[in-house]
Image: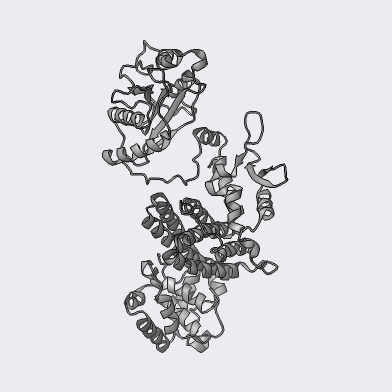
């Protein structure tokens, strides 16, 4: 249940006309009162003998009783209270009790003999009500509505539990500002899937990913097509910025600008600068971008190290890594092929909430992740096949484990909204992984099935020796042939299978994987510095039985061959 308190207004009649009207899209059905301050307010929706004007005059009486100079300019208080999708439909009587509890909790009408404001609750849809009040009490004083939004949210959490509704995770004040009703209606009129605020937040967030200074950041905003205004002090120092979409205009035809801090708490210029403040002492990166596959392999290594930091590091250091993980995810979504882009974009949007908490990040410890994000952006778009595609699967695999670790970290700290957001991001990453990993794992699967039996048995013995607790699970999984082929590749270039497996078996998050063998494939290939997707010439020496049934990598990926089952993580 979400109470949404709007800024105060100055026309009670205007708000009532909207609530009792058809709505902007004819969505209002049977508008009527469910409750009021005295239980006897006239209802223009159900009583043909009364009018909106009568209800407005009743609500406005305490305001009008004051001398004109003492009347507040903005005196109309308005909140909507909405149930979650999937909740049962509440009766009018239940909504009436919800309204009474909300106005009491917020100080609008506290009860217990205390003077309160006049209010009315209007229902014109199954899933929500609107509460209208005038901000002058019956005795002429102003109500104690300080922090009414937080008080309404706290009461809503109690109501949800008592009425058996979906229980919303409590917030901590670090969430980005929600789009207003006016912004949502405007987006609908313009045919946008998202509001301007939401589009700007995503674009600015991506511009931050891996940036190392003001100039690069603002160049990225301009390249993304945003209108940018900078706030400059008389001294010439840059103090802040605001951005607008070129086609988002107000009634006067002027662009609607949003300051960075209104997009998200960590997108103000001072907070953004904290990210790259430690970069200035770092040596400059090598000239020229690396290949997309190499950038993804570097990112996987940085993400792997970050998992241990989130598990074992100090809170401020872990917080910095969590924030920087969001940058890596944004960069990966921006540069990945079309077949994973939507899921990665949704994962990044969900994880945005998980990237902030009241634990202030200790910047400077997150440079490996920020550099990984920078390399991903500089490397440009990746192909959806071959080494690029397989390296993408490797990076997503490691990112999934990091974000799962982040969800557990937030849960331990009591950050309910952030933990929920990280879990939602992980679900989108699982979808992206399944698509990205399907073809490269199919190639490895077919190769593993054609390994010579002595070699296959030797790799199975290595698994039993290195990870006895998980060995039987790994050997029984559909992904075992892919792992066997990977271990054969590693041995062919001089590695010892048991040593590699022992190194990855010690990672505490390994047991949480849906397919341990799939995870081991990417870990071993990364640790052994094997190409994520190659069909090396040395595989014959490693014992692979070549025959016409075994496709080459290029053939398998180019033709979309999917030998072997697709595994779920």
Tell how many labels.
0
Would you identify the image quadrant in which residue 103 lies? top left
> Does residue 42 sit above or below 531 in this rendering?
above
Would you identify the image quadrant in which residue 385 lies? bottom right
Q: Residue at x 69, y 54 (%)?
A: 215
> Does residue 429 sit above or below 487 in this rendering?
above
Please tell me which residue lies in front, 111 or 178: 111
Q: Is residue 56 visible?
A: no
Residue 168: % across, % down: 36, 44
| Residue, far top | 49
Q: Residue at x 42, y 61 (%)?
A: 404
Q: Residue at x 62, y 60 (%)?
A: 377
- Colour scheme in use: one colour
> Does residue 456 sit above or below 418 in this rendering?
below
The quarter of the picture where the C terminus appears is bottom left
Residue 397: % across, % down: 47, 66
Please tell me which residue lies in front, 381 or 245: 245
Residue 420: % across, % down: 40, 52
The quarter of the picture where the N terminus appears is top left
Residue 330: % across, % down: 55, 56
Q: Is residue 24 visible?
A: yes
> Does residue 504 sit above or below 33 in this rendering?
below
């Amino acid at each position: 249940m979400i109470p949404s308190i709007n800024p105060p207004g100055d026309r009670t009649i205007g708000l009532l006309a909207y609530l009792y009207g058809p709505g902007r899209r004819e969505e209002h059905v049977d508008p009527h009162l469910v409750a009021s301050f005295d239980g006897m307010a006239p209802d223009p929706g159900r009583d043909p003998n009364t009018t909106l004007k009568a209800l407005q005059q009743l609500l406005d009486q305490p305001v009008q009783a004051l001398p004109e100079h003492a009347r507040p300019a903005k005196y109309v208080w308005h909140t909507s209270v909405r149930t979650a999708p999937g909740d049962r439909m509440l009766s009018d009587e239940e909504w009436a009790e919800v309204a009474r509890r909300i106005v009491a909790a917020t100080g609008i009408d506290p009860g217990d003999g205390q003077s309160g404001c006049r209010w009315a609750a209007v229902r014109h849809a199954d899933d929500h009500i609107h509460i209208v009040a005038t901000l002058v009490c019956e005795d002429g004083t102003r109500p104690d509505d300080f922090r009414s939004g937080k008080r309404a949210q706290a009461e809503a959490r109690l109501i949800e539990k008592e009425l058996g509704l979906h229980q919303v995770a409590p917030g901590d004040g670090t969430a980005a500002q929600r789009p207003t009703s006016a912004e949502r209606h405007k987006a609908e009129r313009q045919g946008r899937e998202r509001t301007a605020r939401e589009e700007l937040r995503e674009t600015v967030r991506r511009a931050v990913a891996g940036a190392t200074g003001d100039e690069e950041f603002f160049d990225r905003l301009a390249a993304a097509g945003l209108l940018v205004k900078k706030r400059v002090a008389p001294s010439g120092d840059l103090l802040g910025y605001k951005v607008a979409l070129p086609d988002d205009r107000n009634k006067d035809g002027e662009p609607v600008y949003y300051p960075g801090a209104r997009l998200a708490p960590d997108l103000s210029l001072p907070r953004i600068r904290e990210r790259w403040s430690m970069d200035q002492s770092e040596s400059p990166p090598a000239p020229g971008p690396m290949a997309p596959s190499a950038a993804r392999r570097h990112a996987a290594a940085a993400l792997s190290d970050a998992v241990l930091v989130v598990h074992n590091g100090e809170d401020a250091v872990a917080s910095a890594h969590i924030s920087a993980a969001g940058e890596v995810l944004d960069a990966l979504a921006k540069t990945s092929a079309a077949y994973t882009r939507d899921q990665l974009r949704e994962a990044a949007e969900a994880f945005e909430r998980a990237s902030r908490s009241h634990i202030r990040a200790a910047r400077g410890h997150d440079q490996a992740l920020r550099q990984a994000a920078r390399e991903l952006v500089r490397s440009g778009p990746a192909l959806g096949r071959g080494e690029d595609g397989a390296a993408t699967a490797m990076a997503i695999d490691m990112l999934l484990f990091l974000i799962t670790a982040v969800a557990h970290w937030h849960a331990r700290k009591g950050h309910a909204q952030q933990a929920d957001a990280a879990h939602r991001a992980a679900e989108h990453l699982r979808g992206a992984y399944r698509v990205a990993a399907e073809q490269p794992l199919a190639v490895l699967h077919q190769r593993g099935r054609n390994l010579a039996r002595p070699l296959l048995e030797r790799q199975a013995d290595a698994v039993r020796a290195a990870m006895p607790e998980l060995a039987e699970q790994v050997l029984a999984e559909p992904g075992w042939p892919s792992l066997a082929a990977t271990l054969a590749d590693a041995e062919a270039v001089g590695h010892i299978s048991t040593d590699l497996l022992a190194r990855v078996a010690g990672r505490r998050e390994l047991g949480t994987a849906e397919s341990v063998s799939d995870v081991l494939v990417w870990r071993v290939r990364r640790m052994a510095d094997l190409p994520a997707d190659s069909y090396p010439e040395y595989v014959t020496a490693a014992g692979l039985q070549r025959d016409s049934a075994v496709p080459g990598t290029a053939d398998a990926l180019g033709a979309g061959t999917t030998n072997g089952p697709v595994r779920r993580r």
